[in-house]
Structures are given as structure tokens and as C-alpha cells.
Image (tube, rainbow, N blue to C red):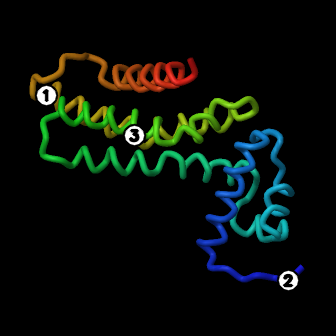
Amino acid sequence: MTRIVKDPEERREELIQTAERLYAKQGYEETAVSDIVKEINVGQGTFHHYFRSKEGLFGAVAEKQVAPLAEEISRIAKDDADPPSKVNAMLNSFLRANSSQMGIMGLLHQKGNYLLHQKTEEIIESRILPILTETVCKGVAQGRFNTECPVESIAILLVSTHFLFYHLIES
């Protein structure tokens, strides 16, 4: 096998994209590290240079899926708009991300990808929920929202929006 040297970030991204593609095709559970390295013609050592385990790569795939949405929501949070407008824009971004990434949505809900779905939800909870919660808390302080439980309210809203959107698309 001829060794092809690539920029480290390019190689890492290649591993992530290949894993994403194979997860979509075979499911996470059915995709082995050997499948991923074989697909891009690299050795197991190359894989382990970038990721400690299959689960580590899995986390990178989930993070890649959430990153654009988290960046968009962070940008909206910094806008000068009032809190209700910001929350509206954030939820619209969330819905657009779901619709523009139907391949990813399909991937998350595919049989054998429960763990990917769970990991993606954890990343959404850690990266997006705090931004939305802070925006709602500012709205409560300004008298624009009325809730005693902003964290729970936003969590329920996100989960409900995600669930409803996916099931509307499915039918």
C-alpha cells in the first residue's frame, strides 16, 4: 500500500466524513474501525493517532453535526434584538438545521444509531441549551417571559420541536 501523507486536519476530517458515511449506510453498531480505515486506505495506527477509540470518533461525528447550529445560535444570542425575537430566531435556526440536514436526521433515527442520537442530544444540551436558557432568563428579567423554570422550559421546547419535526417529516 502506497502511503499518502495528508495534512493532519484533512486526515482527521476524512476519518470523520468516512465514519459519517458508513454510519448512514451500515449503522454505528455495525461499523467497525477496520471498515473505516479500509475505506480510506489507512492503517489502524493512523486511526488511533487521531482518535483513542471508535467512541472517540463517534463523539467527533456528533460534534460535527451540532457545530454549525451552535455557531448560528451563538451569533443570534449576540444580536441586539429583544429576547423573544432571539428565541424565535434560535428556534427557527434549530428547525432549519433539522430540515437542511435530513441525511443527518435520518442517520440519527436509523436503527443501530441510538448512541449517535443520544450523543448528539448531549452535545445540543451542553452547547445550545445554555445559550437559549440565558436568553430566556434575560427575557424573564425584562418581563418579556414568565417562567420559573427557564432551563426546563427550553429543554422541553427543544425536545418537543425536534420530536415533532422529525415525526412530521416521517409521515
Q: Residues within 10 Å of mark 2 (few under 14, many from 20)?
A: few
Marks 1, 3: nearer the viewer: 3
Look at the numbered disc 3 and give the secondary structure of its residue: loop
Residue 56 in the image: above or below residue 38: above
Residue 103: percent from the left, percent from the top?
59, 41
Quick check: 64 above or below 45?
Answer: above
Q: Residues within 10 Å of mark 1 (few under 14, many from 20)?
A: few
| Camera-side mark, 1 or 2 | 2
Q: Secondary structure at mark 1?
A: helix
Q: CA distance from mark 2 to mark 3?
A: 43 Å
Q: Earlier in the sequence, mark 2 or mark 3?
A: 2
- Which residue does the numbered mark 3 point to in the structure image? 128
Residue 2 numbered tag: 2
Three-letter amino acid code at disc 1? Ala
Query: Residue visible at 79% across and 57% down?
Result: 36
Residue 9 at x, y percent in the picture:
59, 72
Circle number at residue 141: 1
Among the 4 quarters of the image, the one containing residue 105: top right
Could you tell me if the residues under marks 1 and 3 are in contact, i.e. CB atoms within 8 Å? no
